[in-house]
Amino acid sequence: MLPNPDSGARSTAPVEIRKPWAGRIGLPGWWRLLAWRRRPALRADLQAALRAAGRLAQMPDEDFDRLLGETRRTLRAAVARTGEGGMLSHRAQAMAVLAEAAHRQLGQRPERGQLMAAMAMVAGQVAEAGPCSGKTLAIALAAAFCAWTGRVCHVIVATDALVMRDAADMTPFYARCGLSAAALPAQAQADAAAFAYRAEVLYATARRVLHDSLREKQGAGPGPARRGAAAGPVAAHDGLQMALVDDADRVMIDDAGMPFIVSEPGSNPVLLEAIELARALCERFVAGRHYRFEQNGHRLVFTAAGQELLDAVAAELPPLWRAQRRRDELLMQAIIVRDRLVRGVHYNVQKDPFGDGMRIAFTDVPVADLLPERTLHVGLTQALEAREGLPLSHPPRTSERISYQAFFGRYQHLGGAAGDLRGLENELWRVYGAVVQRVAAPAATRAAVRHEVVPDAAAGLAVAAESAAVWGAQGHAVLIGLRRVDAFRPLVEALQGRNARLRVLGVAPPRADDWVLAAGEVLVVPEALLLGADLKLERPRTPVALVLPEALDSTRAERSFWARGARLDTERVGLRLIALDQRAVPAWLRRLAADATADAGAPPAAALGLRLLLRRILYRARRRAARGARWQRHQLFLHEQQLRLQLAFAAARGTPPALQGAGRSASSFPGDPHAKH
């Protein structure tokens, strides 16, 4: 029997070491059977709630508010007596009352899909509601229901901008239901966090809750478990109770590829000396001559001339850094910081809240894709400090770490919603025990999309600018989505050269009116901001044009992008450009495309066949990348379990070690270069 490291070195509780699929049948598609078995009860409760809607709509406000209180007390008493069975037996009645409360307070009548999604979430399922389906209201209904049971509900969303937006929009609804609600952004201080964690419904990002959870475990601040918390709107409780995850595909899958780490101050003067020197040496390296970027900018490769220069500058490095791999990674990091990381996009320089100087704070735009090797993350903050001329801080020492998979597994009740979960159902079931319930059929969102083949990414930006300018002149509202930050400048310059009415979102968090599209206007948006975008038209029935000059990070992201136009219910056109210089395109296909382009007499069927072949090859490349990412998440989970076991052995001997290496600094949150958004 080994002591549990979460309970202290003297505990005799066993350490929980489990595989992701422990206790669950791992047959492919098993989740379908479970979803099918639960669907009749879900439909029956939905019909009962819809039948009650007419009666509730005719009830005076005074009587309805009295009914709200009675329903809350009844539900809480039923859960206290019978647990989850009491939740499900009162699901239809409580959801009908909550739906009417939302209509009276917010002016929003929940639709069938939203009600069904909310009912699925309170049953511990993940609802696939379809893109742009009103998940915010559905999650609010489910969160109010969960809080009515007497347990604290955490609503986990993807970004801080969505935390503030959703909490502000739904707080009047929670107040009408007799519930307290709070928002906890990344910048909130400890006193604000302590107040927020006493609320019955809390909106926060996974990174913030993970950070506070590990800090709470160390006794360094308030956290979500609220162990020993003072009495508030909810009595003190022990452990994580209920969580509803918005955009579950991003939070529970995409962001789960890296562990979350809390660090304490460390000291590494050797690393700081090397980073300062690398900052000066990287100025000798010229793009195109000494190095180039491949895989759509995800990988830096040194040329033969670059290798010669590396050998030459090695003599100027300290002896520890002259080994080939250390030397290459040190200079590679310095070049990427110089060429790819953009101030105001990837990071900001702001006043240090814990001192008098300035510090580096990372934004929500991920940088992990720009530094695919984990070793390049070590000293990244210090490399940026060297670039900005700030005093270099010592890299932190890792003291606590946890994976997303392990953290969400600690909640007693876990549900969520997403627009598109195709291909992720088995992983959600095997890792989190979450059954995906489809409440809306996938919409056909790309009927009017035209695919064009271009020689390279630069040509794609030129074609996108020309098409957007033409559509804007014709009175269309144009939306352009971009993945690469370095593509913004050439695209904006090309649009300005064509006198397009242009708006660009990127640095400041977008406001609600930023998503209002006017006729003849071109709006350029980075992929990171498209999540949760609520597009509206200044004038109804304005035709819309959607343009993707380059591939987004995933097929799910692209389906969501095309769904933005479908949701507006107006005439729409789309353009998707496919560049031949992508790494996934084989050389023989590039030559074939060049020959087909040069042959003016080639039949139209040849061009169509080329486009279809390219789309198929890129689709298969994405499938391979998705399998690789899934394998990485699986290995991370097993590694974290093994690490937990090793720490348990160390705790049993009375000498729990600190994990060595650079990680996420609690003192510089939200400065996490490891996280993907």
Image (cartoon, rainbow, N blue to C red):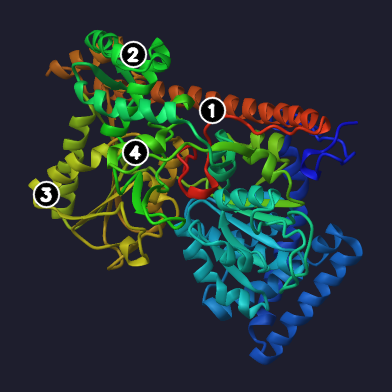
Q: Nearer the viewer, mark 1 or mark 4?
A: 4
Could you say where residue 415 lies in the image, as x and y percent from the top left?
68, 52
Query: Residue 111 appears at what percent x and percent y?
Result: 57, 65
* Closer mark to the observer between disc 3 and disc 4: 4
Residue 496 drawn at (x, y percent): 11, 49
Which one is closest to the eye, mark 3 or mark 2?
Answer: 3
Q: Earlier in the sequence, mark 4 or mark 2?
A: 4
Q: Nearer the viewer, residue 417 or 290?
A: 290
Q: Which mark is residue 496?
A: 3
Secondary structure, mark 4, is helix
Q: Quadrant of the N terminus?
A: top right
Residue shown at the point (30%, 63%) measured from the top left:
541
Determine crowd level at label 3: few under 14, some 14-19, many 20+ residues with C-alpha closer than 10 A: some
Q: What's the distance in space between the residues labelled 1 and 4, CA to CA?
A: 28 Å
Say which residue label 4 marks.
384
- Which amino acid, mark 1? Ala
Give the Cα separation between the discs numbered 3 and 1: 39 Å
Residue type, label 4: Leu
Label 4 – label 2 distance at C-alpha: 36 Å
Q: Position of residue 226 (x, y in %)?
A: 72, 60
